[in-house]
Amino acid sequence: MLDEELRRGAKPFYRPFALALARRGVGGDALTGAGLGVGVICLVAVAVGANVLGLVLWLLNRLFDGLDGEVARLRGESSDFGAFADIVADFFMYGGLVVALAIQHPEARLALVVLFFSYYLNGSIFLVLSDILHRLDVKRLTERGLHFRRSLTEGFETIVAGVLFLIFPDWVSPIAWVFAAMVFVSSAQRVLDGWRALK
């Protein structure tokens, strides 16, 4: 819901880091890969209950996710593969965190399964709609590699949910139920958005 506003507001702060990386020859795809490696360690940490380490790595992974596209644009290397790798890494982390939490919190598995289903539904709608809009040559609303349409839950809200899961382990089930409901709302918004855009 707040992704684009936060992205514009934060750009003056993270752009110097992106410029420094670009000047040193670090590419966007390399950052995506490094972020994915950090993410794998994060998920293992969460699964074994090391929430403090998991939280640090979760935020670091999300930082890499924010930097990779900016570095690629600065280096003139934006590509379809980069957009593809970025979204694959995102979905790996979003779904992987739910699985890691389910391993750590067996008592919350029903809520986490419902959350996982909401991710699956929302992600499928998002990807299909993005592909159709691309084929119809509809103007993109952002500078990102795919057609991102506004909805209640986007990247920022998912980051916040991950932080809450790791800071409040006794509240994993309620957090999962609430966030799943929000993601289902996002799915409905995207269906309505698709109907309006494609009708």
Image: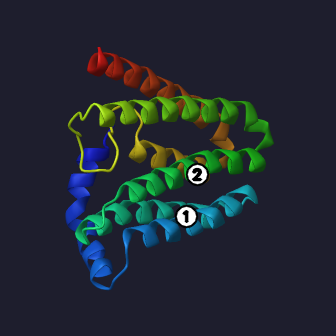
Q: Are marks 2 and 1 in contact (CB under 8 Å)?
A: yes
- Compared across the picture, whether 192 is left or right of 39 comes to left
Residue 36 is labelled as: 1
Q: Which residue is mark 2?
A: 92
Residue drawn at (27%, 21%), measured in percent from left and top? 197
Q: Position of residue 146 (x, y in %)?
A: 35, 44
In the image, 1 versus 66, the foreground residue is: 66
Instruction: Please name the residue shown 57% across and 53% down the image.
Output: 93
Give the residue type that dot 1 points to. Answer: Leu
Indicate which disc residue 73 carries. Answer: none
Where is residue 88 drawn, in percent x and y? Answer: 52, 51
Point out residue 114 in the picture as x, y percentages from the top left corner.
Answer: 65, 29
- State the image quarter where residue 130 is shown: top left
Q: Quadrant of the C terminus?
A: top left
Disc 2 marks a residue whose amino acid type is Phe
**SS for tag 2?**
helix
Q: Residue furthest right?
A: 106
Residue at the extreme bottom of the image, as rendered: 24
Nearer-the-camera pick, 162 or 154:
154
Q: Is residue 168 visible?
A: no
Distance, label 2 to label 1, CA atoms, is 8 Å
| Quadrant in the picture for residue 151 | top left
Residue 126: % across, % down? 43, 33
- Residue 149 versus residue 166 in the image, above or below: above
Q: Is residue 172 left or right of residue 152?
A: right
Relative to 48, say whether 163 is above or below. Answer: above
